[in-house]
Amino acid sequence: MLLLGIGIFFSLTVMLPVQAGSDHLYHDPWPPRPGSIGKVYMNRPIARVMGYEGAYWLERPQRAQEENPDAVIAALNLQPTDIVADIGSGTGYFSTKISEQVLDGTVLAVDVQPQMQRILASRLQDEGIDNIIPILGEEQDPHLPAGEVDLALMVDTYHEFAYPYEMMQGILKGLKPGGRVVLVEYKKENPLIPIKPLHKMSQAQVRREMAGVGLEWMAALEVVPHQHVLVFQKPADSVTLQK
């Protein structure tokens, strides 16, 4: 059965504090949509972020069969020297796999929860991995180095950003001109996928939101049956502003 235990996973959520600013981008419907943080962005209710208490779910044995991460990573055509930002890295499930493909590069593992970062740091020490750098991000800033990232990956993460516009601006700042953004999201178009609706996104919605921050559409990779793998690009003529 696909995603056994999904009900347990989504019960382990936390409500992150909502900050002020950029109010014109968001509105607060009443009553709020169940399972949301009470904010809507581009007609999409924003889902609650998964709490660190559910970290074990990210490492469930059946995840490899459900999501086929090796196939997703292979489709990214990473180069050994690439700098990859894993946004919403959690326990490092994808970061550690990516690190094996960029042995002369770096994985920037970004998460907003200090508890997740501690779990990752312990894992890196235990496994002797030295090309992953944990970064504690904030709701409005991933704290990426300006103009250094070749690819930013978000796996089942973007739909939980409390400030998607601001986070994407931070990611854009971190990307090299021509750098790629890849979003992996469960397909909202398929009602049979046993994921709560707020934790799915349609391809049309993703493309609309990425266009809104200035990213160029590249491709939809048909890699896994239940998730979109959508690729965008920072315009090659973009000027990166240094912090």
Image (cartoon, helix red, strand yellow):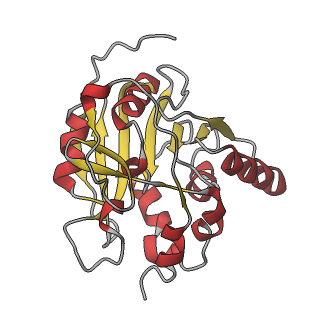
Quarter of the picture containing the N terminus is bottom left
Please name the residue shown 60% across and 78% down the image: 61
Work out which residue is located at the far front of the displayed protein and give it.
31
Find residue 52 and report its horizontal and vertical position in percent: 64, 57
Look at the picture and state if 208 lies above or below 47. Answer: above
**Residue 214 horizontal side relative to residue 161, left or right:** left
Residue 37 in view in this figure? yes
Find residue 50 and report its horizontal and vertical position in percent: 53, 58
Find residue 212 and report its horizontal and vertical position in percent: 21, 32
**Residue 202 horizontal side relative to residue 19, left or right:** left
Please name the residue shown 45% across and 33% down the image: 150
Look at the picture and state if 239 lies above or below 88. Answer: above
**Residue 192 horizontal side relative to residue 50, left or right:** left
* Residue 190 occupies quadrant: bottom left
Find residue 9 and report its horizontal and vertical position in percent: 53, 71
Please name the residue shown 64% across and 35% down the image: 135
**Residue 82 horizontal side relative to residue 206, left or right:** right
The total number of labels drawn is 0
Residue 77 in view in this figure? no
Residues 128 and 79: in front is 128
* Residue 27 occupies quadrant: top left
Please name the residue shown 50% across and 19% down the image: 146
Work out which residue is located at the far bottom of the displayed protein and give it.
1
